Image (spheres, rainbow, N blue to C red):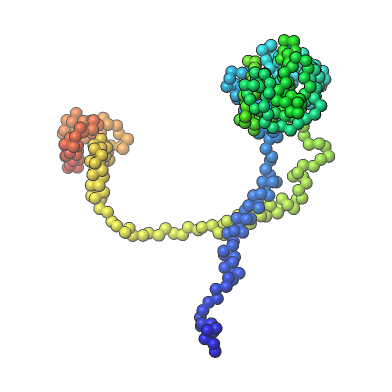
Amino acid sequence: MNLATAPEKGSASTSPTAASLWRGGRGILLVALIVVVSAVVGVLLGGGSGESRPLDPADTSLSGGKGLTQLLRAHDVEVRRVTSVAEAEAADSGESTLLLSDTSFLTEAEARRLGALSADRLVVGAQRYQELLAPGVSSAETVRTRSREPRCALRAAAGAGSAYMGGAVFTAPPGATGCYPAGGAPTLVRYPDGDRTITVVGDGRFMTNLRLAEDGNAALAMNLAGAKPSLIWLTAPETTEGPVPGEQSFSELIPGGVRWAVVQLAVVVFLLALWQGRRLGPVVAERLPVVVRAAETVEGRARLYRARHARDRAAAALRAGFTDRVTPRLGLPSAAGPEAKVDAIAGRTGQAAFHVAAALYGPPPADEAGLVALATYLDMLERQVRE
């Protein structure tokens, strides 16, 4: 027999077995199962987050206008969020700016009422009823929104510098100032209209929470929306419409067997957790490797007090220990007050109550000699009470 190839007697095979593979991979399988169950349950039971409302002063999403609202209020500009023409009319004080970012929900009569307000007007994008809200301004095309230079003498734009502008480009009426041009046509137009000033911008994303901190977007938004002490911010009313009749929700489209499978998987995970969970056995008493005498503990603490010159803590420890040991011998409850303890000790030992009170509740010793004297006096009192 070839000894080089003969297996040794009693040697064990090192190839993995099914049992060893299961022991090594069951933890990974359990984690994967929990992840899958969590994902399925999250899809079935988790509700979606609230729908974002672009350029809504109360919306904190990336497309909302909460950041601009806070900036305006920090500069003492009153921001009033309204969702109807009647509210806008009630808020119009003559020293206001009306911001219109969405007019799709308005009727023509409501647009005419908005056009008659005395407030300055800031119209975002090519809105519905453009001819009523910004007379003389028309838009025929759109351009890519990107960082652009103002290239105009308008103080609100020149002071802000480059901004994230684009969207609709406008044909400005006579006497208007155009800024942030794209292909020769402005994406921001401002012109006087009687006692009011009307401003139209092609894209309002420079005012959103996402873009406000870029370039000069915040400065431009502040200059346009915060020119007057009050800003009336008109947004679309929140809809409370239910599902369309005849349509099924996502949960209704899920077969009933899927819900039952999720319940079964949850039970399996629970049983696996019980099976693999760590079980605590009985308490095992062990001998301490080192036995420290009580006297050494006391001496060590005393050295620490002495090193830190903590005479007040040392005196407090002496008094507390004395009181705990003496109070039961005097027949007093643990909640007895200082006067009762002083009277009982003085009556038992014959010492003057004034000296007893000073020893138990007086100020801490001024030096180490005073601390030693206090300890000696307390030992004498304890001995007399015990005897």
Number of residue marks: 0
Quarter assignment of residue 97:
top right
Measured as percent of width and height from the top left, residue 119 is found at: 71, 14
Measured as percent of width and height from the top left, residue 216 is found at: 62, 27
> Is residue 110 left or right of 148 when viewed as pictured?
right
Instruction: Report whether residue 48 is seen.
Output: yes
Question: Which part of the image, by quadrant, shows the N terminus?
Answer: bottom right
Q: Residue at x 74, y 16 (%)?
A: 176
- Extreme-top residue of the structure: 195
311 or 282, which lies in front? 311
> Is residue 115 left or right of 55 when viewed as pictured?
right
Measured as percent of width and height from the top left, residue 140 is found at: 81, 26
Q: Residue at x 61, y 59 (%)?
A: 29
Measured as percent of width and height from the top left, residue 174 is found at: 78, 15
In the figure, 34 relative to 73: above or below?
below
- Extreme-bottom residue of the structure: 1
Q: Residue at x 18, y 41 (%)?
A: 379
Question: Which part of the image, by quadrant, shows the C terminus?
Answer: top left
Instruction: Report whether residue 374 is seen.
Output: no
Quarter assignment of residue 376:
top left
In the figure, 384 relative to 183: above or below?
below
94 or 270, which lies in front? 94
Q: Residue at x 63, y 55 (%)?
A: 33
In the figure, 155 relative to 380: above or below?
above
Quarter assignment of residue 355:
top left
